[in-house]
């Protein structure tokens, strides 16, 4: 099997959906026993020179048309049970509070891709 260069790997990542990237990260965790997101989060503060607040709150405005997918994501992100995740999807509200801005953007992208209406506060 041919070895991928860094540029080829990044190029293939750009073509993936958020869900496919998440599955790749999960497979890396399982295969190598490491969490690649921890490395990215640890490196982000040194690289980031963003203006504005460093923490954000992910607020669900509406679950949209594909509520089941949104409930699954909420359940996975929050650790809530199915009933609690469904209630949050029905009513809306804070999904995660005071988390790093990069994590908030990632969560927003996951929920938006599933059809939810999300804002960052």
Image (cartoon, grey):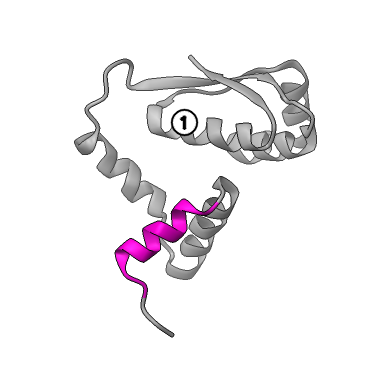
User: Is residue 19 in the magenta section?
Assistant: no
Q: Is residue 116 visible?
A: yes
Q: Residues within 10 Å of mark 1 (few under 14, many from 20)?
A: some
The residue depicted at 52 percent of the width and 53 percent of the height is 21
Q: Is residue 21 left or right of residue 102?
A: right
Residue 65 percent across, percent down from the top left: 79, 29
Identify the secondary structure beneath mark 1: helix
User: Is residue 13 in the magenta section?
Assistant: yes
Near-viewer residue (97 or 47): 47
Q: Is residue 79 visible?
A: no
Residue 98 percent across, percent down from the top left: 43, 21
Q: Is residue 104 left or right of residue 59?
A: left
Q: Bounds of the magenta span?
A: 4-16
The residue depicted at 43 percent of the width and 20 percent of the height is 56
- Whether 105 is drawn above or below 39: the answer is above
The residue depicted at 52 percent of the width and 59 percent of the height is 24
Dominant secondary structure (helix, strand or loop) of the stretch shown in magenta: helix
Residue 39 percent across, percent down from the top left: 32, 50
Residue 84 percent across, percent down from the top left: 74, 27
Q: Is residue 68 left or right of residue 38?
A: right
| Residue highlighted by disc 1 | 105
Near-viewer residue (44 or 86): 44
């Amino acid at each position: 099997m041919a070895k991928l260069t860094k540029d080829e790997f990044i190029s293939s990542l750009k073509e993936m959906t958020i869900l496919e990237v998440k599955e790749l990260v999960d497979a890396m965790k399982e295969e190598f026993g490491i969490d690649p997101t921890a490395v990215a989060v640890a490196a982000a503060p040194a690289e980031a020179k963003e203006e504005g607040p460093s923490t954000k709150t992910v607020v669900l405005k509406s679950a949209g048309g594909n509520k089941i997918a949104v409930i699954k994501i909420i359940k996975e992100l929050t650790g809530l049970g199915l009933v609690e995740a469904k209630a949050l999807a029905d009513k809306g509200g804070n999904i995660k509070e005071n988390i790093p801005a990069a994590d908030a953007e990632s969560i927003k992208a996951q929920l938006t891709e599933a059809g939810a209406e999300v804002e960052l506060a």
